[in-house]
Image: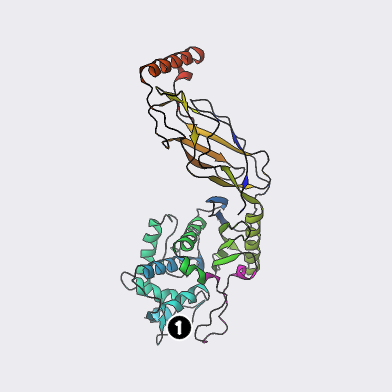
Amino acid sequence: MSILRRPLRTLVAVLGTALLSLSAALPAQAFDTRARAAFVVDITTDTVLLTKEADVPLPPASMSKLMTLYVTFEAIRDGRLQLDEELPVSQHAMDYGGSTMFLDTTDRVKVSDLIQGIIVLSGNDACAVLAEALSPDGTEAGFASYMTQRARQMGMTNSTFANSNGWPDPMQRMSMRDLALLATHIIEDFPEFYTYFAEREFAFDGRAPQNIHNRNPLLSMGIGADGLKTGHTEEAGYGLVGSAVDPVSNRRVVFVYAGLDSTQARAEEGRSIVNWAFRQFTESTLVEAGEVLPTRLPVHEGAAMDVGLTVAEDVTTLVPVLTGDGVASEIVARGPVKAPIEKGQELGELVIHPEGLPEKRIPLIAAEAVPHGGFTAKLQSAARYLLRRINEGPEEAAPAEAAS
């Protein structure tokens, strides 16, 4: 993968020097989504590209089925459920309307079929069957309570569940950010199951030939999309949790949007988001591992007067394609630092400000060791401190931490 190298424009030194202000220019490539709420993240570089009402709990419709699937995948991984295990269908599961696998109480259905039935056919009944099998008390309500607790543990603080499938309920709520986090967990934690999400058809025992197609319109567009789940109710509108990989850069994006007014608008929005995310940003290496930055940190009582700053790993980030003469950055550190200093010791942060994107903070470490300098070094440090007091005044001379 080709990664461009762009220069860092480091605007700030250390030792309490006042930080230069950074202009907040609006990026020309900003995406104006038609959705009520949306969230787009490049998970390859962990860069948030778009947020709109991303933390507002909204009715997720069938997109909340992803939580049922995640809990199911955990149960299979932990040995509490088997893919070839057959589960009974309760009257409660059979009674669900909407999108279903047309299950009835005479059925015993393999877990693998239920998973495909949820992903491809959006089966409300299939969700209920798995929910009752995995519930602490055997009920779908008990499973929903468990999902809410599990979501909190995973960092989804704006999600609550009343059922397993997104059936309209005032307590069934998820935010766009939470759905993106959940999708990312599925992709990264269960790659062996993620391939199910790219399946376009699933003809479960031939009983419902009118319901065999995956509702995700992006899978057939040739844009690198390989998941995850659509959703629609009258209250929620049309929404989608999607993911796609750029075949050129191999970057993966996860995107969530909700509140559109038609299936056509949902499909068009997904295509537009993927095109924008892949075409309007490029991955750039800003600092290579071990590369010593021009700014050095003063050392107090050391065998050397200063220490070099570097990074432990390559620093890469997304930048807009129209970025000009470099990426703005600042060094945030407290200096002078007292010796002895070990090589690799964390001494501060490099704060990257890509235009129009969230800042990134990368730990800065000592590029070399600086041992204690003894009595002579103490005298030299004291002399330098006195000179700063004379030249700058007592307030400016005192070491202070730079603030962003």
Q: Judge left or right: residue 366 versus residue 259.
A: left
- Nearer-the-camera pick, 235 or 361: 361
Q: Amino acid at mark 1?
A: Leu
The answer to which quarter of the image holds residue 142 is: bottom left
Q: Where does the image place residue 265, in percent across and percent down from the top left?
A: 65, 65
Q: Quadrant of the N terminus?
A: bottom right
Q: Which residue is mark 1?
A: 103
Please name the residue shown 42% across and 16% down the image.
380
Magenta: main secondary structure equals loop
Q: In which quadrant of the rendered view does residue 219 lie?
A: bottom right
Asked if one can make out residue 346 in the rendered structure from this viewpoint, the answer is yes
Classed neighbour count for the residue bearing mark 1: other residues with Cα under 10 Å, few (<14), some (14–19), many (≥20): many
Residue 331 shown in magenta: no
In this picture the colour scheme is: rainbow
Indicate the position of residue 279 as horizontal and vertical percent values: 66, 54
Q: Residue furthest top?
A: 390
Residue visible at 66% across and 43% down? 323
Q: Is residue 129 left or right of residue 49?
A: left
- Which residues are the magenta region? 197-221
Q: Is residue 403 visible?
A: no
The total of numbered circles placed on residues is 1
Position of 194 compared to 147: left or right? Answer: right
Asked if 347 appears above or below 95 in the picture, the reply is: above
Specify whether 33 is left or right of 241: right
Q: Position of residue 140 (x, y in %)?
A: 38, 72
Q: What's the residue at 37%, 25% (across, down)? A: 372
254 or 191, nearer to the observer: 191
